[in-house]
Image: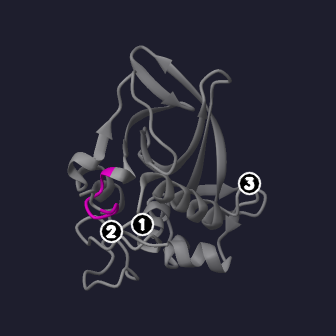
């Protein structure tokens, strides 16, 4: 199914299904895996390249979202090529009111794209268990020490509130891209 989605539930389940496929769930995908190469468009081979932003941009394109003011891909069907340094900034600052700045009383929904720092990183949110103090995400831009290669996989981190901030592991959750707020991703209600 592709945008515009008939409802938020379908949108979010599609986003999670794509992120799960891209990461091969807990198993992960390594540099050289055909899906990993498709998600990163081969850029993970570049020295010093971090692929965390590739996952949400790939997911959006797979969902049929093609707004090139936001999407930063070569394979998005548009005319604007991928641009270095634009992955995170377009998701955070290029999405207008679709980006939600974190507050103690708000939580993301499954499929939303989290923005954490330092260092800057984006990932796709799967679930939160506040009682257990854990958050599960789909992440690219990781390193598999055993294989000695970049990877993408499902990741479970600690989650807590401290001093008015929400923490994902040791990083501060600054906000998230609420997929349901992206213009044109849901069917307009009449």
Q: Secondary structure at mark 2?
A: loop
Left or right: where 180 falls relative to 47: left
Whole-number angstrom distance, CA of label 1 to CA of label 2: 7 Å
> Label 2: how many residues lie within 10 Å, few (<14), some (14-19) or many (20+)?
many
In this view, the residue farthest toward the top is 163
- Residue 67 locus on image (x, y percent): 27, 70
Q: In terms of depth relative to the viewer, which is nearer, 176 or 74?
A: 176
> Which comes before the other along the chain, label 3 or label 2?
3
Dots 1, 2 in contact, CB < 8 A: yes
| Residue 13 badge | none
| Quarter of the rendering containing residue 103 | top left
Q: Is residue 182 magenta?
A: yes
Residues shaded magenta: 181-187
| Residue 26 badge | 3
| Quarter of the rendering containing residue 65 | bottom left
Q: Secondary structure at mark 1?
A: helix
Dots 3, 2 in contact, CB < 8 A: no
Q: Which residue is mark 1?
A: 60
């Amino acid at each position: 199914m592709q945008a515009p989605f008939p409802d938020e539930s379908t949108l979010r389940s599609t986003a999670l299904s794509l992120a799960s496929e891209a990461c091969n769930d807990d198993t992960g995908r390594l540099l050289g895996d055909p899906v990993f190469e498709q998600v990163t468009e081969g850029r993970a081979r570049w020295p010093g390249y971090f692929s965390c932003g590739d996952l949400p941009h790939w997911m959006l394109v797979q969902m049929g979202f093609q707004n090139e003011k936001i999407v930063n891909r070569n394979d998005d069907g548009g005319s604007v090529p991928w641009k270095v340094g634009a992955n995170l900034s377009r998701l955070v600052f290029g999405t207008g009111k679709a980006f939600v700045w974190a507050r103690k009383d708000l939580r993301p929904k499954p499929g939303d794209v989290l923005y954490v720092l330092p260092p800057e990183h984006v990932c796709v949110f799967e679930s939160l268990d506040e009682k257990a103090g854990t958050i599960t995400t789909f992440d690219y831009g990781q390193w598999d020490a055993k294989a000695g290669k970049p990877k993408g996989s499902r990741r479970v981190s600690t989650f807590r509130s401290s001093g008015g901030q929400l923490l994902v592991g040791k990083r501060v959750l600054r906000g998230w891209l609420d997929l349901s707020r992206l213009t044109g991703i849901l069917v307009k209600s009449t």
